[in-house]
Image (cartoon, grey):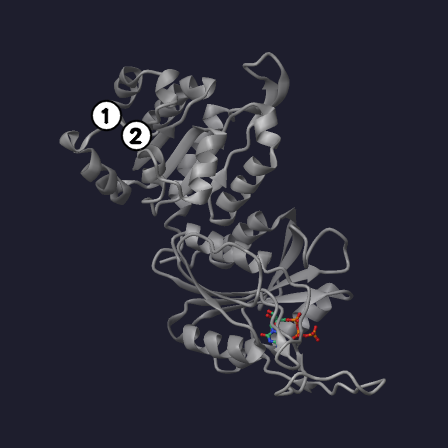
Amino acid sequence: MVVALGISGGIAAYKACEIIRGLDKAGVEVQTILSRGGARFITPLTLQTLSRNTVLSDRTGPGDGGAVRHIDLTRRIDVFAVAPATANFLAKFARGIADDFLSTFYISVTAPVVVAPAMNSRMWDHPATRENLAILKARGTRSLEPESGWLAEQEQGVGRLADPERIVQAILEEAEISSLLANLHVVVTAGPTREPLDPVRFRSNRSSGRMGFSLASAAARRGARVTLITGPVGLHTPRGVRRIDVESSAEMRKAVLESRADADAVIMAAAVSDYIPPRSEGKIKKGAAEIDLRLSRGPDILMELGQSRGSEILIGFAAETENLLDNARDKLARKNLDFIVANDISVPGIGMEAGENEVTILDREGNTHPVPRAPKEQIAGRILDHVFRGRSR
Ligand code: CTP
């Protein structure tokens, strides 16, 4: 296993030594990349001695094989980790700025990325840092949040680099999960659908798309080929995911039926509109005091998949406000699914629009598997790990 370890400028740079040691003990080859700031805190000689590898940095010129090594290395590595990651490097990674070796390396990498931020608590709390980290996480980057304690500036707060042992553990885990779903094609739907009333108006629902996007991201992190079919949402496309944007349920149906041909699993996390209004060609003008809107049943995409199933695993979601498990069981049977993920949307703080969820996974054999409340990114990983147990190729 090969890990590229980026070290950016901060007092915690010295802790990179422990990370290299931990990885080395686990039999991992480490290739360090030192930023200009990092080199003010730790010497290349230390890193070279511990990793038994030359150190890459801005000073690695084409003459040293730098330009070639950088692309060559992106192909060889299993994980790219950056510890410590400064506020500046999080910003560069989030925005794709490539003005030095480490940031240029980041935008060339396809391997899973782990960052361990370390900085003063004021910088950590700044909205710019929060936004940059949110972008990286949405892309599938694993972040080991800094710990709270005494900082170098003689004040207390959150900002200390996570424990090096935890960082080593996270890197090893990332490498391990990155091939769990290799060679599988996973189709995920997300978000709401919009059913047009006229050229300017539509009916829709409150789905944020986060559950579906988290599933797509988690599947890509596990090495799957992922097609994400999404209604209109304001979310960043996860790393390594092919995204197809749709609006109406009819468009979503078409995209799903096309993508399922060679799919190993279809996960319907989208909140598809059940009832469709008639569409007026021209804008509906204000006139009468009341107007009637007669809605007709639209396509039930998942039902259609269940009726014409091949060997793919079919996973549905059941958003319920009452009789959660009974209704979910009924949907699982009616739609001929392998699994259904039941979530109670009447509980405040979880489900639609929320960042967290708490679900129960039901299968055809009548088993129930509860997944306790957690951020949707974690719930997504647990759903995939449950559904694909023993099924990876
Ligand atoms: N679904 C679908 N097409 C629809 C409605 C739902 O493919 N027209 C899928 C959803 O993506 C989800 C599952 O079916 O995976 C269940 O969705 P849900 O809205 O909970 O159930 P419905 O079948 O719409 O039943 P009801 O609204 O009566 O609860």
- The percent position of residue 86, horizontal first and vertical second, equals 47, 29
For the point 66% across and 62% down, which residue is it? Answer: 342
Residue linked to disc 1: 53
**In this view of the protein, which residue sits in the foreground, 292 or 280?**
280
For marks 2 and 1, the one nearer the N-term is 2
- The percent position of residue 176, horizontal first and vertical second, equals 39, 43
Residue 57 visible in rendering: no
- The percent position of residue 61, horizontal first and vertical second, equals 20, 30
The outermost residue toward the left is 63
**In this view of the protein, which residue sits in the foreground, 249 or 214?**
249
- The percent position of residue 186, horizontal first and vertical second, equals 44, 63
Mark 1: amino acid:
Asn
Residue 79, quarter of the rendered image: top left
Please say if 306 is above or below 148.
below
Indicate left or right for 84 with 278 as reference: left
Residue 102 visible in rendering: yes
Mark 2: amino acid:
Val
For the point 40% across and 26% down, which residue is it? Answer: 8
Please say if 151 is above or below 249.
above
Indicate left or right for 20 with 232 as reference: left
Cβ of disc 2 within 8 Å of ligand 1?
A: no
**In this view of the protein, which residue sits in the foreground, 222 or 76?**
76
Q: Residues within 10 Å of mark 2 (few under 14, many from 20)?
A: many
What is the secondary structure assignment of the residue under circle 2? strand
What is the secondary structure assignment of the residue under circle 1? loop
Disc 2 + disc 1, Cβ < 8 Å:
yes
Indicate left or right for 290 with 232 as reference: right
Please say if 332 is above or below 177.
below
Gap in angstroms between the C-alphas marked 2 and 1: 7 Å
Q: Residues within 10 Å of mark 1 (few under 14, many from 20)?
A: few
Q: Which mark is residue 30?
A: 2
Quadrant holding the C terminus: bottom left
